[in-house]
Amino acid sequence: MLFRDIPQFVHDGGYTCDIPFESLPDEVKRFITKYGLQMQPDFQRAHVWSNKQSIKFVEFLLRGGSSSRIIYFNHPGWMSCYEGDFVLVDGLQRLTACMQFVNNDLPIFGGHYRNEYTDHLSMLCGLKFNINTLQTRAEVLQWYLDLNEG
């Protein structure tokens, strides 16, 4: 028996970029209007987090938490022809929570909204977008299952 014989997960692609909190609404809007991003493809769960869960996640990030910052997308033509379905594969709950915070729709730390803070968010505080270029729906579905299995 060899470790190298263990079947591997679907590779998560090679394109990643850091998106500061304050840029999230503009970037998501650009992805939707320019590239046709589907935020809730048919395999994606609906919004299931409670307000409390959303608040806890945003507070976790603002306190310096670093896990769970990656939001996974797939676009088969990314950085080439830009043809094909652009879908959010994993991270809808996390992205939604952060967008609610940035848009002053989610109070944090005892009821305070983003616009109550007088300084700017650190450029280090935000999310990382990972865009894969899987070519088939079957590959995307397998990747979704891989990401959510463990």
Image (cartoon, rainbow, N blue to C red):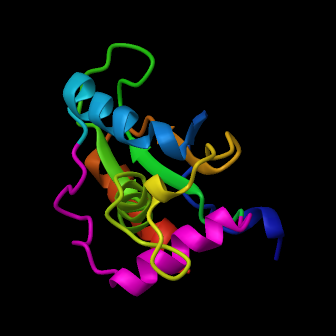
When the figure is inspected, residue 81 is found, relative to residue 88, above or below; the finding is: above
Q: Is 50 a magenta residue?
A: yes
When the figure is inspected, residue 129 is found, relative to residue 92, above or below; the finding is: above
Relative to 44, is 59 on the left or the right?
A: right
Q: Nearer the viewer, residue 42 or 142?
A: 42
Relative to 18, is 48 on the left or the right?
A: left
User: What residue is drawn where x is 41% and y is 40%?
Assistant: 134
User: What residue is drawn where x is 53% and y is 68%?
Assistant: 58
Relative to 20, is 84 on the left or the right?
A: left
The C terminus is located in which quarter?
Answer: bottom right
Counting from the top left corner in percent of width and height, residue 119 is at 63, 46
Counting from the top left corner in percent of width and height, residue 44 is at 26, 65
Residue 75 visible here: no
Q: Which residues make up the magenta segment?
A: 38-65
User: What residue is drawn where x is 43% and y is 42%?
Assistant: 24
Q: Nearer the viewer, residue 143 or 131?
A: 131
Relative to 111, is 61 on the left or the right?
A: right
Q: Nearer the viewer, residue 16 or 60?
A: 60
Q: Residue extending furthest top?
A: 81
